[in-house]
Image: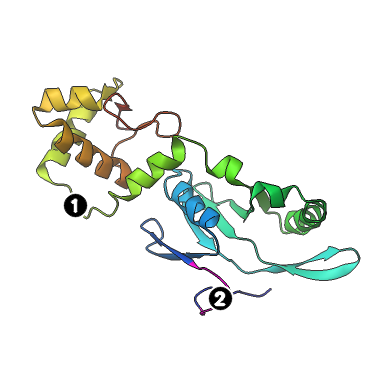
Amino acid sequence: MYNRNLRKPNPDKNIYKFISVKNKTSIMCESSLEYDTCFLFEYNVDIVNYQSQPSGFEYIFEEKKRFYTPDFLAEYVDLTKEYFEVKPYFRAVETEFVQKFKAIKVSVNKKKTAISLISERQIHIQPRLDNAKLLYRYAGIQQLNPLQHEIVSFLRRQRLNQVSVKVLAIKLNYSQGDVNSNVLALLSAGYIQADIVNNKFNEEILLWVD
């Protein structure tokens, strides 16, 4: 088992730093694709924490001992864990890498853990990624302001009924801009819910409270 340190300066690499509210720390990434992956982990409600460049491990390929460090390790709400390898699609389908990844999966299975290979085809799905990046701009609220309290209370009173952002502004008698920004902050912090995976955030998106 060994660890790589992306915080150590390397003139040959462009290191991206993602400030994670979920993890309360910075996540170091080796590519823009890994950086984009952090947005998806940050707003995946099933993931409670994640880290980049977790402890590596050995695997056997072509009868030789090799060393491998996954790009990410995520822990889910059910306490299971999963490694992630992030690769551009053209690299992910190269014959040598496909063979190596099969050998890596054998080693991971022995650890009773899962590993998934993801490329831009899974990461750059819209509107999910753009929504996650939008929510990230409103992340980090420490306490609710009066309008945010009103929004949460109103949605709770609706029980099973979902309400659009547009209707919310009308019912609470606030400007659409004020409601939009405060809804985004609440969504980012998990106080309210919306289907940001399948629906682009706009005035018609439906909101609810679990």
Q: Amino acid at mark 1?
A: Gln
Question: Which secondary structure lies at badge 1?
Answer: loop
- Residue shown at 70% from the left, 52% from the top: 91
Q: Earlier in the sequence, mark 1 or mark 2?
A: 2
Crowdedness of circle 2 by 10 Å Cα count: few (<14), some, many (20+)? few
Which residues, given as a range, are shown in magenta? 8-15
Marks 1, 2: nearer the viewer? 2
Q: Quadrant of residue 83?
A: bottom right
Q: Amino acid at mark 2?
A: Asn
Q: Quadrant of residue 56?
A: bottom right
- Residue shown at 91% from the left, 66% from the top: 63
**128 is higher (above) or lower (below) than 48:** above
Q: Which quarter of the image is occupied by the N terminus?
A: bottom right
Residue 152 screen position, x and y as percent: 21, 35
Which residue is tagged 2? Answer: 5
Residue 72 screen position, x and y as percent: 57, 58
Examine the residues drawn in magenta and state their main secondary structure.
loop
Q: 151 and 77: which one is in front?
A: 151
Q: 206 and 108: which one is in front?
A: 206
Residue 27 screen position, x and y as percent: 46, 64
Q: Is residue 127 left or right of residue 66?
A: left
Asked whether the beta carbons under mark 1 and mark 2 sit within 8 Å of each other, the answer is: no
Q: Is residue 34 left or right of residue 160?
A: right
Answer whether residue 14 is magenta in the image.
Answer: yes
